[in-house]
Amino acid sequence: MRPDPTDIIAKKRLRYSRKKIDYGSSFARNFTRLSGLIFLFSMVTIVSLNFDKFVLYVDRPVTKIRVENQWNYVDSEDIKKVVSTRMGVGFFRFDLKGLKFDLESLPWIDEAVINRLWPDTVSFHLREQVAIAYWNNEGLLNPRGEIFTPTNLNQVTGVPHLRGPDESQLHIMEQFEAFNKILKPSGLKLSGIKLSDRGSWNLTVNDSIFITVGRSDLNDRLERFLRFYKENGFYEDFRNSEIDLRYGNGIAVKKLNEEYTELAYR
């Protein structure tokens, strides 16, 4: 049976139509890709031409400093000197770690917390050192037993004087607290303590009673002094006196303005 010429013509038209559709789809895909490449190239060109302007806009020079807290002993002039050397640097290039190191190198600054504030500001919060005692008339001690040596030592008042060999400050701080705990119930307060190179302890109580405790039986000797202290008129009898507790069963008392020594035995 011969094929119907009408069917043959219809099939040829269908194949031709499919070819046209496939050709149209391929063209559309290629056009889309080309358009995307043109757009990407245009954006790269625009960014390249304006990159310097963009960088200058976002990386503006730091020209402002914001201080987040106040302090008592830190010298503002020292802060200005440290900060001024770093001003004018770009925002993202500003060396926060370097500024932190420089600030914490100043004697009164214990810690510096520094942050950037876009577009042109750096803020910092300074934690000041806490002076709990003088150390050997050459510096101050913080609660961690670290020595720092500011130039304005005389501004610190109301703290005790600790003296002793190098590297002995932590041991002396501990013994200071132990002695003070014994003295406090009697209304007395340590204002100074010294550890000699031979290990002997000397105390200054209420700024006017000077006590030699010695090297052994420290607590027992101090308790013995307190018994005499309570039995003999309290503070007035011992004010401006040197007291030696290195006796087996008593103490020696010497008024600073007198030449004789009175021995009191128990």
Image (cartoon, helix red, strand yellow):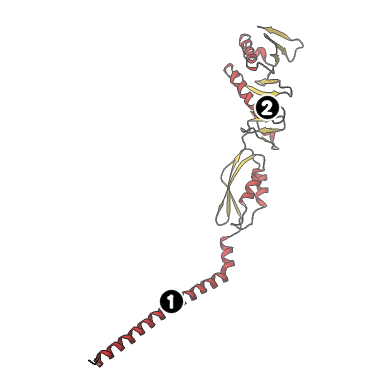
Q: Earlier in the sequence, mark 2 or mark 1?
A: 1
From the image, tell me which residue sits under label 1. Answer: 32
Which element is circle 2 on?
Answer: strand
Residue 4: x percent and y percent?
Answer: 24, 91
Quarter of the figure with the N terminus: bottom left
The amino acid on which the numbered mark 2 sits, given as a three-letter code, is His
Instruction: Return the residue found at the far top.
Output: 266
Q: From the viewer's perspective, is 215 left or right of 58?
A: right
Name the element at disc 1: helix
Label 1: few (<14), some (14–19) or many (≥20) C-alpha neighbours in 10 Å: few
* The quarter of the displayed image where residue 193 is located: top right
Q: Quadrant of residue 143?
A: top right
Residue at the right extreme, as displayed: 259
Q: Which residue is mark 2?
A: 161
Q: Amino acid at mark 1?
A: Thr
The residue furthest front is 1
Q: Residue at x 58, y 63 (%)?
A: 55
Residue 141, relative to residue 217: is it above or below? below
Q: Which residue is at the front of the view, 3 or 141?
A: 3
For this view, does 165 lie left or right of residue 111? right
Of residue 202 and residue 123, the one placed in the foreground of this image is 202
Give how far across and how far down residue 76 sits, in percent.
Answer: 65, 44
Q: Position of residue 101 (x, y in %)?
A: 64, 46
Foreground label between 2 and 1: 1
Callout 2: 10 Å neighbours few (<14), some, many (20+)? many
